[in-house]
Amino acid sequence: MAEPTTKNIVILGGSYAGISTAHYLLKHAIPKLSDSHSYQVVLVSASSEIICRPACPRAMISDDLLSQEKLWVSIPEVFKNYPVSNFRFEHARAEHVDHANRTVSIRYEKEEEDEKTIPFHALVIATGCSTPSPLLGLNKDSTELRAQWALFRDAMMKAKSIVIAGGGPAGVETAGELGEYLNGQPGWFAGKLENPKVDITVVTSASQILPLLRSSIALKAEDYLARVGVTVIKGTKVTGVTPPESGTDLALPTKATVSLSDETELNADIYIPAVGMTPNTSFLDKSLLMSDGRVETNHSTLRVDKAGDRVYAVGDVGSYARPAVHSILNAVPVVCANIKRDLLLAAGDEAGAERSFKEDTRETQMVPIGRSKGVGAAMGYRLPSFLVWLIKGRDYWLWTTGDLWSGKQWEKES
């Protein structure tokens, strides 16, 4: 099909990867194009607000625990200083990508116009993943997430037992935050908390919690959890939940019977599934996807080779690296450099060499446990609890998001 006069660079997804890519291209790619006025970055997001998703385990408990102004940020507001001709925000959800004819269909949920088809000159897929629990991510929009948190807070204050499925960072952080909030902060030399006010149980099928970290760090995390009344069950899988919708929508009944692979059952006033994520790729042709649902991405260039020219994937939705915020931030300059190069070549201009991404596979993960403890490692080095608190545990990265959302982090081309 003939390409329109305006060359749309469509970015699907309004979180870490999508917001960062949009800022980077507007600062360092569009101005370098000879006819820059004819290019427009079109950012499509189902939510008009960004949230620091790692902060959800603490933020869901109470508005008093984290700065709400830093937690919720308007997407249109952080892009208001760019020329209107170069940027457009679409508060909509991606419905379908026709990569052969190079169009994206989007759907609006709260406007008179239901659908729109946007032709693209370049496409960036940055839609991320959805969490099984509606408490731990922006699966829909900010209004829905706030509503789920309100329901949870009401149920939380009445609960006597909470079961969390999943021993990864989300499950462990959620357990630690709930344990400290409901059972109290432990003393300096506290051991296992006997007779907690609320029984909190973490169930993991792995042989240890936090499987990406060495066993000694995982055991320290388990010790910190015990101090706030959290019991860990390892090597055991959740095989079923009754009723089956428990934990997936707090508007539905929250009480649940949790069946385990060792044939025991746990009764929970609240059940929180915190294991696994579902890539947001239902709008894509299956020929572009890996078996796990992520976009099949060139591990070096971050292009989606099967989708044709100038199609890319960045963030948790791509197959080039394991999901992690630091991987996203390392990938953004690479994918943007390659987008810039491809745009210049398509315009008949000179372009430099393409860049290559290399995943950092060193042991790197920081996990706060409550508001004063934490475990983790960075670049293969074990971190003391104090440093985990200082870097992440104080406010779950909120101190970093101001520059990230505003684009200041990407002022220099790197």
Image (spheres, helix red, strand yellow):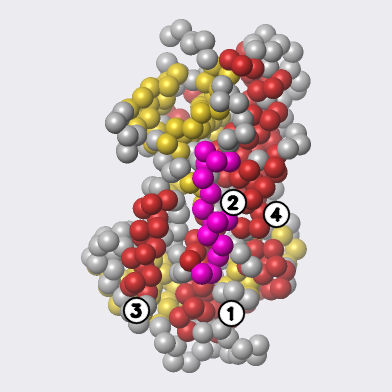
Q: CA distance from mark 2 to mark 3?
A: 32 Å
Mark 4 in CB contact with mark 3 (< 8 angstroms)? no
Secondary-structure class at tag 3: loop
The residue labelled by disc 2 is 324
Q: Quadrant of the N terminus?
A: top left
Q: Main secondary structure of the magenta part?
A: helix
* Neighbour tally class for label 1: few under 14, some 14-19, many 20 plus, Cα within 10 Å: many
The magenta-colored residue range is 64-78
Q: CA distance from mark 2 to mark 4?
A: 12 Å
Q: Is residue 296 visible?
A: no
Q: CA distance from mark 1 to mark 3?
A: 22 Å
Q: CA distance from mark 1 to mark 4?
A: 24 Å
Q: Is residue 98 left or right of residue 19?
A: left
Which of the two discs, 1 and 4, labels the residue nearer the N terminus? 1
Disc 3 marks which amino acid?
Answer: Ala
Disc 2 marks which amino acid?
Answer: Ala
The residue labelled by disc 1 is 224
Q: Where residue 140 is drawn, which disc sits there?
A: none
Q: CA distance from mark 4 to mark 3?
A: 39 Å
Q: Please report the residue visible at 62 percent of the width from the left and 34 percent of the height from the top.
A: 81
Q: Is residue 333 left or right of residue 180?
A: right
Please provide percent x and percent y for residue 330.
Answer: 68, 43
- The quadrant holding residue 285 is top left
Secondary-structure class at tag 1: helix
Disc 1 marks which amino acid?
Answer: Tyr
